[in-house]
Structures are given as structure tokens and as C-alpha cells.
Amino acid sequence: MVRLDRLVNVLGGYGVRLCCCPVPRSAELRGVVLRDVSDDRAEVGDVYLAVGAESVADAVRGALTARALVVLVRGGDDFLADAVAVGEAEGVAVMLADPALSWSQLAGVVYGLVLEGRETESGRGPTDLFALADSLADATGGAVTIEDPLSRVLAYSSPQQEVDAARLETIMGRQVPAWVREYFDAAGVGAHLLASDEPLFVAGEPARGLTGRTVVAVRVGRELLGAVWVACPGPLERARLTALTDGARTVALHLLRLRASADLERQVESELVFRLLEGTADAATVVSRLGLPPGPARVVAVRAHVGDERHAAVLLAFEQATTGFGWSRPGRSALSGTGVYTILPGERVAAARDWLAALTAALPANVAVSAGISSVAEAADLPAARQEADECLALHETRTGDTAPPAYDESWDEILLQRLRTAARVGRTPARGPVADLRRHDAEHGTGFVATLRAWLETQGDLAAAGERLGVHGNTVRNRLRKMSEVTSLDLDDAGKRVAMMIDLAATVSETDNR
């Protein structure tokens, strides 16, 4: 949003002349309309770009339809007299652009100024949707929230109006409460937003702290980008209803610009995160550029899928992980193939699991999420933390049921055994030796020598404890060990050989080992 005076001064540097100005130059400009001769739908905005207009009169007529304060026409000096006469007569400011300027160039400057200017009294730019929410609240007379299609709060107006309990809970949680969503869904709000651009009033439920609401879809083409909600005890009057519908179109333009900006920011963020995860000499500088606090952090690796489809779900997870301004989310994320890596500051495992729980809850119910959490690492150690997160993720994917994502400092032993098994599968495993000999004997004779050896080693030679684990008497264990020593050379008195046998057992698990 900028003032007309600012637009005139900037465009003047490009050779655009203000021919007449029957409106105050202090007027605020919040929206832009581009003339489209192939579309009969009425669009409204404060600045009208008369692309393809055959005359000044034609351009001004379009501006009046769009309820614009100023119209831009491209033409030579022969347009000047008409511009003054028609503009003054109709009360529209007319700006005449040199024909050497292309419409794409003019549109780029105008859209940038009007939608990304820094002229608000609060000092916030209008790409900050909070300023736009305040403006809509003034125009409609009710408290405003701007939400995305998942009912997450993107912006809300200042508390100039009385707020109800539902609005307060919505703002505090940055998400519409479940009971409020259910109430509006039952009233048909969701179906209405998908099908119509007309505002809808829904009566409230005062007993539960919910006053009435008027809602209108924020849409670009067929895509629903969100909704604007106004708290009001009854249906909005005509002028206020018009302000709401006009405001929804302006919100749509802002969300488009924010989406493009967010995509660029995500790309930059991903590149910086990967620099840290792959190792860089200036790790502390990169951490600062990402807006992360210095100190310990954890790496979280996430995979998401719906059935066999992985790519779409991962994109949803990445979008959720990077939703919000830097100050409003703790981590910084990068998208990699079928996974998402997030660097979370802090040492507490519980905080990382809480973040994962919030991420999972924000995704559709049919999306399955697996994750792994590294141990605590300083900036220079994040490449090693990434490997730990990957291994914990692989461990989580092997588990069944709704289990908590493993963290490396809690599950290092399982990770180590997994490494041993992986090495055994791809490397050269012992084909000879005590464990291999006993395993062959079990396969040929149906004995349980490998399970007995495992139980004896894990109970550190306690015959009674080993027998209890196997479901037999301790003397049975002693007899089995004697028979096993006839099959192969165990040397159980040798500490080194005991360690080697435990590693061999851990790395080469067979389906028959526990019989």
C-alpha cells in the first residue's frame, strides 16, 4: 500500500505524467486491476491499468467500473487534452505513460509499489497481512482474521473491537480450535467456500463464546487460498459487505506475492541448511544467516508417505515445516529427495519430539510420518548429526506400531547393531568359526545351540539367568554348553573370544537363532 503521491513521484521517474488529479494525492492505494477485455467479471482496485484501451474515455470507463482512484493510460501527446477533460469530469486521476514503456514494465513497478510499499502508519509493509487485516477491520466494523485453507491464522486485526472467546483461542493457538471448525463445517461453510465467492453469514453460539461470523473466500482462479473472517453479530450491511468482497481480492493478490516470496526464501533456506549438513568452514556464519541461535542443536530427518506415494506427502511436510515467519518457527529445513531435514536449536529430545508431533498433526490424517533425531551437536558437527538422524530414521521405519521417533543418544546401541548387520550384509561375514559352526549344527539337527550361547553371553555366564531366559533349568544350559564344545571350539574362558562371538551374533541374526 502506498499513497497516490508516492506512486506519482516514482512513475514520474519513468516518464509517466500526471495529467489531472481530482482526488487527494494523500489517498491510499491498496489494490491493482489489470484490464481484461476477455473477462466480464468485475474486478475492483485503486489503480486501473488500462491495457489495450482505445481512448482515454474507454480507459476512464473501465476505471469507474473498477472503482479506481487513478488510471494509467499509455499514449502520446494527442491523448493529453482528453485525459484532462475526461478525468476531471469523472473524478478519476489520469496518468499518461510514454508509449516506449511496455505494459509489463509498468505493471511490474505498479504492483511492486502498491502491494509491497512501506507506507503504512504502523511502519509495517502491506505484504505484512496484519496491516491489511487492520484496514479491513476498519472498513467492515468487525474483528478480522485471515486464514489459510487449513484454518491456520495468517493474520488478524488489532483488538480495536470486542473479541469473543473463540477468536482469542484462535489467535493464541494460531489455529482455529477443532470445535469451532466442526461448528462451521456443520453450518456448510467449507462447502460454500469451495463453491462460491459470495460472503456467507453464520450465526454464532454465544453460550460457547462464539459470536456471528461473515466469511468470504480468498481465491485466485479456481484455487482457494484461504478465507477472510469478520466477527459480527449480524449480516454485514451493503457498504461493509462490498468492502469485504473487495478486500478478499486484495488479500488474494498479497497471498500470491507472499507465496512467490516464500518459495524463494525456502530455496535460500534449503541451500544454507545443506551447507551446514554437508560441512562448511564458516558454519557459525551460516547459522547466523539462518537466524538460528548459536549453541547446541539437533538434526531431525523426516519421511512422509501416503501408501506407496512418497513425493506429494514429503512436499506437504516440507511446506508445513517451513510455514511461518522465521521468528515464529524454531527450526530451519531443507528438502532432499524423499525426505526433509530440519535443524532444531536446543538440547532437549522432548522439544524435538513435540515439534514432530505438531508437524504430524498439521498433515492430513492419511499421511504416515517416520522420523529420526540426532544427538546434540555444535554447528561444526552437524554433518555427523545428519548421519545419526538418517540412521535413527531408518530404525524408526523398521519399528511397528505408533512408536516415538528414536533419538541417537537414547538408541545408539540399536544403531550400532544396525551398522554391524549392514556391514555383515554387504561385507564378508565369517563362514567358519564358533557361531557359524553352531548355526549349521542347529540347522541340521534342530538344536538350539546358538540361542543358548546368546543367552549365556548376555547374562554374563549366569546359568540360572540364562536358563530362565530360555525356559529351561540352569543344568540344561550347562549340559548344552558341554555338547556345544564338542561341536566347535568355544574357549568361553577367553574374554576376547567372548566379545567376538557377541559381535558375530549381533551382526548375523538368523531366523533360527531363537528357537
Image (cartoon, helix red, strand yellow):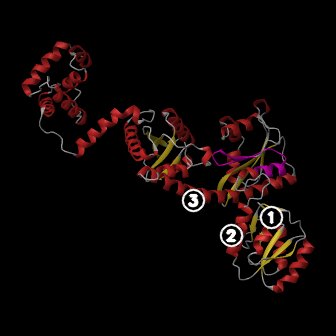
Report how far apart the C-alphas of labels 1 and 2 lie in the structure.
16 Å
Please provide the residue range marked out in magenta. 133-156
- Report which quarter residue 23 is drawn in: bottom right
Q: Which residue is mark 1?
A: 46
How far from the left and from the top, in percent, is residue 472?
21, 15
How far from the left and from the top, in percent, is residue 420?
26, 39
Is 176 displayed left or right of 60 in the figure?
A: left
Judged from the image, the secondary structure of the residue bearing numbered disc 2 is helix
Q: Is residue 366 visible?
A: no
Residue furthest out toward the right: 89
Report how far apart the C-alphas of labels 1 and 3 lie in the structure.
28 Å
Tally of marks: 3
Numbered label attached to residue 383: none
Q: Which residue is mark 3?
A: 264
Numbered label attached to residue 108: 2
Judged from the image, the secondary structure of the residue bearing numbered disc 3 is helix
Name the residue at 43% across, 49% down: 277
| Chain-order first, disc 1 or disc 3 | 1
329 versus 95 height, above or below: above
Disc 1 marks which amino acid? Asp
Mark 2 crowdedness (10 Å alpha carbons): few <14, some 14-19, many ≥20: few
